[in-house]
Amino acid sequence: MLRSNFKTATAALLATLLSGTAALADITILAWPGEPSESAFRKVLDLYNTTEGAKNNSKASVIYFSQQGFKEKMLADVAAGSKEFDVMLTATYDVGLYAPFMTPIDDIITEDVYKVVSKNSIETQKYEGKTYGIPTDLSLHFLYYRNDLIDQLNSDPAWKAKYEEISEKILGKKLSPKPADQWNWDDFIASALFFTKSINPDSPTRYGTVLQMKNLLYNIMLWQGTVASNGGDWRDKDGNITIDSPAYKRGLEIYKIITDNEATPGDSSTYEYGEANSVFGAGQVAFMLQWNAAVPEFNDATKYPAVAGKLGLSHEPAGSEGPKTHFHSLGLGINKNSDKQDEAKKFLSWLGSSDALTLYAKEGGSPPLAEGPLAVIAADRPEMALMGEHAAKYGFVMNGGTSAKALGIYTNQAENFTGYWTGEIEEDEAIANVTADMKKAFAP
Amino acid sequence: MSDATSFEQQQRASARVLLVPLCLFMAALLGFPTLINLWYSFSDVSFQNLVGSFVGLDNYVAALSNPKMWQALGFSLKFAVLCTVIEVAAALVLVFILHPLLVKRPWMTAILMLPMMVSPALMGVMYRLILNEFTGPIPVYLEMMGYGVNFLGRGNIYKTIVAIEVLQWTPFAFLILLTARQTISYELEEAAAVDGATGFRSSFHILLPLMIPALVIVLFVRFIDSFRVFDHIYVLTGGGPGNLTTSISIYIYKLFFVQHTLGEAVAVSILLLLMSLALIASAMRLVVRRS
């Protein structure tokens, strides 16, 4: 009897231990910081931890590095074999760089995922045919403008006359105002000049636009729509570097004219996303090119009362090839060094579900949703439909823009092109430096 | 063998034994990283292959033949000399002016030390806000008074980053020099006063020569510190526009983390280490000679 009880107790104990080991372990996620996506992602994690995570007995928590130097810290960590995070950030422009440190996740990209996430955004998380991340945020650029000012420019005869006078005087051609969605780059420049107080003392804003010209790779992504819209690319189909081209020169010229005529704030060479938002949000400029992530902020009257309710959105101005926008996706993938591969995979499978990504979108994230879930959140986030449309119609990725060398190339362009815009170096020198760097980077 | 010689030998032997833990500690903390870095500088190490293979002097040749390295080195040297001279001169003047006050109210020294308690990166963020043309209080008030100054614009950015460095680190120089000033005996000053040396003459001919060892040390420390400036410049300008504000530390950082040329980045660091060692040796020789 005693022996039988002992056996039963041992079996019960073993069963308990086995069931305990069958439960999944907790995972840590390294995600991209910054609002509104940070708060939105925390809500998504709360949902996971109370639903799917609770079912699997696995809890997910998130950690953030600061935006400045984020990628460098992550690279140092994964190269050193860190297991501090199980799920890590992926991005279109550096998926090739991080691929050796990540686990491909093609086995969880099922038909169900394609029903939730747009197919072309999953393509942007691929490197050499393998998928490394579930895309969570689509990033592209809009032309943000004050519709009260642009409407008046198109209807007020005195403003129209002044606009024509300024464009003729500075650009050498008489241009007439147009609605923002019909702008080409000349209209963009002329409008920037018109809304600059030092050029037009009657301008309601101090500067026409705000350019982000800090020596930072993301600022080159923002700028390169000027190039792509004129047919420019990093390389041609044979892999030859094509920086020394009319398209690149035109792109450089657009920023140069605006900078030289002081139609952007004088300290624009230290500006990035945040500074540009504060200037536009304070009503000091009439329009700007900016990442899509800023839309919810400008619709918030408590944050930017000068702009809320007057915000217009359009595609970037057109070049000879029509309008274009750089686009990429941020996503989450699995750290190859992690001991919790299964847990991480389960989390990512859940993240690719409609529940997770529609909640993320409602809370302020910008996931690249497929048509079905997009319709569900259209009322809450009208600009997301616009994002999907723009990505499909105008989106481009430079030839080589997902390679392991892409980050270095962007940084080198930032160094040289910001140097040109602020008069540190000549255009030919900047182009030659970038070309030489790219030849080295893409050398076999 | 005399007792004195034997005692001396025993002392030396004990000193060697007592130095062993320190040497082991230094070998572990400095020796290993130095050796690893030396290997990196002679190898084609990468993030994907942290061992690398031997490439001889290739990294050093690449480093020395890159004009950007010389440009960044020039920036750092100029920046360091300018900041050091301004900081030490300002600190010296402040010491002579404020010493009598601080003797009576020593707690005021703590207030003067506040700027150097702030992290340089945070200082960069702070000034990015304070000096912003639209949201920064300083440009806004100056404009209200009719002086529109664009502190972060291309024309002023160099002066601005020098001013931030000086504002943050003058208190450090001040603290060292104040300590040196306070060690000078009051009797000496009294004797100089009796001989008719007061005010400027006393400061220049009596006090200043006695403060020279401290002055050399503070010049040296501030030079090294300003030479390797990184934080506030990186936060404010990212080394730009162009390479206008790229210091040698920012240059190495970019080589390492952006261009991923790890070997070349380490080679530049090793070259800088050698230069710094030469500087340390000359500064220490000067201090020892003065002492």
Image (tube, grey):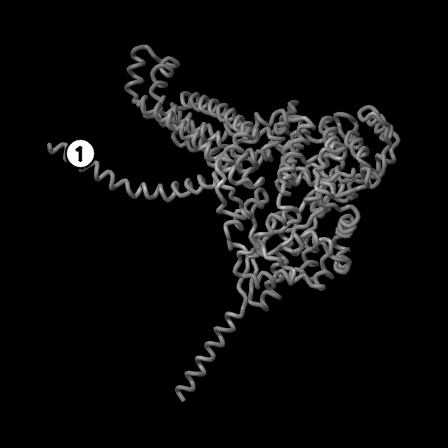
Query: How would you rate the neighbour count of disc 1 (Cα within 10 Å): few for under 14, some for 14-19, many for 20 or more?
Result: few
Percent position of residue A222, x then y? 70, 40
Left or right of B282? Residue B136 is right
Residue at 42 percent of width and 85 percent of height:
A5
Percent position of residue B181, x then y? 35, 24
Position above or below: A349 against B167: below
Position above or below: A292 against B66: below
Residue A372 appearing in the image = yes
Quadrant of the image containing the C terminus of chain A: top right
Percent position of residue B56, x then y? 48, 37
The foreground one among A1 and A80 is A80
- Residue behind mark 1: B8
Place residue B280 in its image quadrant. Answer: top left
Mark 1 is on which residue type? Glu
Left or right of A33? Residue B111 is left
Percent position of residue B289, x then y? 31, 22
Residue at 65 percent of width and 62 percent of height:
A108
Position above or below: B19 against B280: below
Q: Secondary structure at mark 1?
A: helix
In the picture as drawn, the residue positioned furthest to the top comes out as: B196
The foreground one among A169 and B38 is B38
- The chain carrying label 1 is B
